[in-house]
Image (cartoon, rainbow, N blue to C red):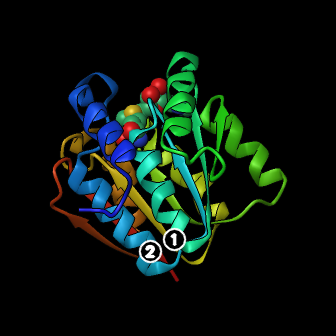
């Protein structure tokens, strides 16, 4: 359990009822990411794939403890507006910058502005993971963490990404047997 207000806990429980429609991560995965962010004291987190904001709420609640900030990207406007409402209900709207747009276009602009992150969570189109990684790698600080969901549930689609990151000597990686399979990687 996390120590959050009843309003937030009720909202998270409500969102879990529509988890399949919005392709949200499992609660176990969300809780794990929350522990990880707090343990690593991550401050500047990027999420690729907001949907209705379920995982972003968990990430933001962890960042409340570290004093950090979340930037989250989504190209589906309807979903992003639902997410914005959910952020307000949970009181985390000040910790989150939701960006509407294609992840590639948004990250391209971030790289031009030399933006850096110490934690990047990939949870959008599984066939695009290798592409996300090429951008994420340019923005991830040394010592930073990449977490990618669905590496077991969508094993074939994410294979090019998994093979690439595992072959990189500057990344220490492990695949965790959480519900959809979570790849964790630390950049040295
Ligand atoms: C698996 S859902 C995200 C779920 C969310 N992380 C959660 O657990 O609550 C993936 C989302 O990524 C969005 N998406 C897919 N490809 C994208 C892209 N190239 N750029 C931006 N958003 C994308 C989809 O519209 C979808 O809402």
Quick check: which quadrant has ligand 1?
top left
Q: Residue furthest front?
A: 6
User: Residue 186 got which mark?
Assistant: none
In the displayed structure, 6 sits above or below 77; it is: below
Left/right placement of residue 130 relative to residue 148 reads right
Foreground residue among 42 and 164: 42
Q: Could you say where residue 168 lies in the image, as x and y percent from the top left?
A: 45, 72
Observer able to see residue 166: no
Task: Write down the residue under mark 2.
Answer: 38
For the point 25% across and 25% down, the residue is 18
Q: Check mark 1 vs ligand 1: CB closer than 8 Å? yes or no.
A: no
Residue at label 1?
A: 65
Are the residues at dot 1 and dot 2 in contact (C-beta closer than 8 Å)? Answer: yes
Measured as percent of width and height from the top left, residue 141 is found at 63, 73
- Specify whether residue 32 is in view: yes
Looking at the image, residue 79 lies above or below residue 121: above
CA neighbours of label 1 inside 10 A, class few (<14), some (14 to 19), many (20+)? few
């Amino acid at each position: 359990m996390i120590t959050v207000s009843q309003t937030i806990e009720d909202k998270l429980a409500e969102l879990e009822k529509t988890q399949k429609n919005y392709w949200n991560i499992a609660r176990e995965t969300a809780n794990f990411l929350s522990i990880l962010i707090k343990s690593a004291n991550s401050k500047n987190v990027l999420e690729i794939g907001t949907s209705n904001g379920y995982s972003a709420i968990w990430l933001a609640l962890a960042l409340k403890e570290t004093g950090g900030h979340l930037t989250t990207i989504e190209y589906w406007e309807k979903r992003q507006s639902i997410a914005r409402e959910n952020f307000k209900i949970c009181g985390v709207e000040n910790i989150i910058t939701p960006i509407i747009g294609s992840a590639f276009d948004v990250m391209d602009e971030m790289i031009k502005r030399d933006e850096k992150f110490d934690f990047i969570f990939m949870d959008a189109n599984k066939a695009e993971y290798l592409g996300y990684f090429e951008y994420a790698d340019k923005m991830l600080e040394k010592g930073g963490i990449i977490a990618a969901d669905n590496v077991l549930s969508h094993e074939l689609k994410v294979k090019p990404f998994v093979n690439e990151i595992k072959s990189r000597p500057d990344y220490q990686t492990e695949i965790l047997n959480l519900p959809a399979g979570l790849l964790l990687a630390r950049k040295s």
